[in-house]
Structure formats: structure tokens, C-alpha cells
Image (tube, coloured by chain):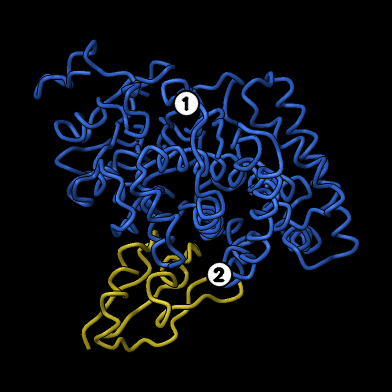
Chain colours: A blue, B yellow
Amino acid sequence: MAPTQAGTMPEAPDTVPEFPMPRDARCPFDPPPALKALQEEAPLTKVRLWDGSEPWLVTRYADQRALLGDPRVSADTDSPGYPTKASPEGGEGKLSFIMMDDPEHARLRRMVTAPFAIKRVEAMRPAVQRIVDSLIDDMLAGPQPVDLVEAFALPLPSLVICELLGVPYADHEFFQENTKTMVRRTATPEQRGAAVREVAGYLAGVIGKRIAEPQDDLLSSIAGRVTAGELTHQEATEMALLLLIAGHETTANMIALGTLALLQNPDQLALLRDTDDPKLVSSAVEELLRYLHITHLGRRRAVTEDIEIGGQVIKAGDGIIMVNEIGNRDAEVFPDPDRLDLRRDARRHVAFGFGVHQCLGQPLARMELQVVYGTLYRRIPTLKAACAIEDVKFKNDAFVYGVHELPVAW
Amino acid sequence: MKVELEADKCVASGQCVLAAMEVFDQDDDGIAILLDEQVADGQLDDVREAIAVCPAAAIRLVEQ
């Protein structure tokens, strides 16, 4: 798509670009070309959303970090001006503390930070390694081609969350089945809603049991907050559901999309396949997080007091959208930004957002991806896509970007 | 140089620990703690990285 001429971008209402913008079908790993053009020519610009509202689109890395770190922005979807996401299910609903502001956000978030501490996450690494190995064993023992999303990318985070929350082994299958339906493309909104209710009801039940008989797991710790009168049973259930939803499809998409990106960049794949250096694996995870960036609809906020930024005043009541996938391609921070380079230092990426709402589960996501990227291609060195890239269906219209399925063989 | 940490701002992202493991750790709730507020010259780059990646702007370096 040709970039709009410089200087003609804002003002006249019919030139306000629509958001989200289409990707170039030939470059499924790159942000939409129009985003790149805006970053260069109009880094703060109004865009039009599905509901006719016109929030600011923030495309430069520095501006995104400044605004996401600013206490004068609100993550509350009820704040005036909040840019709402369109949804086939009609609204995204409120997901516990990620859609609240401090001090209530901080109070609730701090209740569940403990298991995501670096050392606690590291202690889970052997269990994650076992799950990854066992899923790969199953794949190797089964027929080819196999859908990597269904056989590996989706079950892994679901099983890890079981481990984290303390879902009993006997219930894993129930949990897996329903979490699968929650994200399955072909599921109807009714089926998805029913699966969410099933899982929520299940989690509420386990929290009830843990209130009576605490164990050493996250659901018990959340249950303890109910006992202490700090959370209602309902809030506790929502929190457990948030941890599930936030860590499931996101991680799955990074696994499948990351694998496809590596298969398209065989020299980079070879680096991972031929190494046992945890530093290179960790660097590869950061670079793939920077390069792919699956939360393509952007971090969204409402401005609660006038903010001056980049010679522009964003007024109280305006909405702002920080599309981190374009921030992560800002050449001022990442030289040659459109190149996938597993050896670069990509640690300053904003794939997990920035500010007080930055992803709580990031240490777990990092560790899971390190185990996956460090294991999958070494154990299946001849892994290849079993379809042409033109035939891969990308999740352009989903909340979280990725691939719907990825047939692979070896 | 000395490093200062405002623990009440910390959102437990763990980023400082990953960037500078000899300087930062976390308490039982994942909130950052300082292992040593004195920063050796060899640790300065790591601490600067920790400051850059801290999502809550809770860390700073001060001259002594």
C-alpha cells in the first residue's frame, strides 16, 4: 500500500485512516505498511475505529513507553474516550485487574505476583520441559502431517497453567477440552461462552475446595484471600480465569507463529537447532517477541488529564492506542528493525507492554518459550511446514495475531 | 554510584532481576529488593539495562 503523502494526513475528516489497518499479505510477519508510514510521517495521529470514535494512534517507541508509563492514562474500559475493541461476541467484558486503575489494580495484582517471581518460575522449568518432551513424543509417534497448533502450541500453555494454578491431574482433560473450545476458530460464540462458563464454574469449585483445604498452589493462595475477606469468591474466580486466558492463546500463538517465522528464515532456525547455549535461546525469545508481536490491536487507554507529548496536546477524554508491534520496529531503537536477527539485543522491546500494566506472566511466558524454542527444533531437526506459506491462514481478525493452524511434517 | 529502588512503585515484572541478577532480587511476592545498593563499575551496564526495562520507573542511579 502506498503511504499517504506527508502533510496531508490529519484535519479533513475523510482522511482519517481506519484502524486496524490491513497487513500486506506477502509480509505476514510485518506490521501493516500504513503503520510504518504513520510512524515516519505522523507518529501521533487520529484514527477511526469500528464504532466511529477517533482515538490517537501512537506509533513511536519512545511515545508509547512514555504514555503507557504515565499515571494520567486509564486502562478502565468505562473511562470516557476508552477505545473499545470490536468483537463478534459483542464487547470484551471486564477481565479482573487488567481493566482497572491503581490503587485497586495494584491491590489485586499484588495478590498474584508471587508465583511469577523469577526463581519460582525457574523452579517450574523442569515440569515445563517434561510437558514439552511428552507432547513432542506424542507428535513423533503419530501420523504426519500434524497441526502444530492443535498438537503442541495450544496444549502446552494449557497444561502449564494447570501446573501453575494447581488443577488436579485427573481434571486436565476436562480443562484442556474446554480451554480448546474457548479459542477454537470454528466454535460458535455460544459454544465459547459455554466453555468459559464451564471453566469458570470449575475454577470456582476448586477455589471452594482450597478454602476448606489449602494446598501449595496458586488457587490455594487466591482462596486464602477469600478466607481473609480480601476478595469475594466471584473476584477470586475472575482472577483465576484471567490468568488462564492471558497465558493461553498468547503463548500458543508465539509458539506457532514463531515456528513459522523460523521456517521462513532457515539460517535463523539453524542457530537454534544447533545450539545448547541458554543465552542464545533467551536472546532468540526476546527477538521473536520483538519481531512478531501478537497483540496487534494495541494497548489501549483513555487519557484522564491533558498530556503534552511530541508537540501535541492529548486532551482528557481522548483515547489512545499504542500499537506495540510498530514500536518494536522503530529504527531509532532497533537498527534494521524488519530483519529477524536472533543474536541482536532485543530486551527493550514492548511486546509485553509497558507501565504498571506490563504483562504479569512475562517471566513464565519467557521460560515456556525458551523451553519450546530450545527443544522443538533440536528434537525434530527436519521439521518443515506441510503447506505453502500462501495457504497458511493468519489470524488477521482475531484479538491475538497468529496462525489458525500450521500443518508440519519432518 | 548508588542504586535506589522505590519498592512501592514495583509491579513485579522481574525485569531488573533478569538484567542485573547480582544487584536485584525479589521478595516472596515478587517485589524487587536490592541485594547491594553500591554498584561496582562492572555492574553499571547491567543496572542501566534494568533501569531501561523497568516498566514502573522504580529504579535510578545516583552519584555519591
Circle 1 — which element?
loop
The N terminus of chain A: image quadrant: top left
Badge 1: residue crowd in 10 Å (few <14, some 14–19, many ≥20): some
Q: Are marks 2 and 1 on the same chain?
A: no
Q: Residue at x 86, y 53 (%)?
A: A208
Q: Which residue is mark 2?
A: B30
- In the picture provided, is B54 more to the left or to the right than A395? left
Circle 2 — which element?
loop
Residue type at tag 1: Phe
What label does residue A403 carry, if any?
none
Up-down relation of residue A346 to residue A27 (above or below) = below
**Marks 2 and 1 in Cβ contact (< 8 Å):** no
Up-down relation of residue B42 to residue A67 (above or below) = below
Up-down relation of residue A389 to residue A108 (above or below) = above
Observer-nearest of A367 and A206:
A367
On the image, the x and y values in percent for residue A68 come to 36, 48
Q: Nearer the viewer, mark 2 or mark 1?
A: 1
Q: Which residue is mark 1?
A: A394
Residue type at tag 2: Gly
On the image, the x and y values in percent for residue A283 come to 38, 60
Q: Quadrant of residue A266?
A: top left
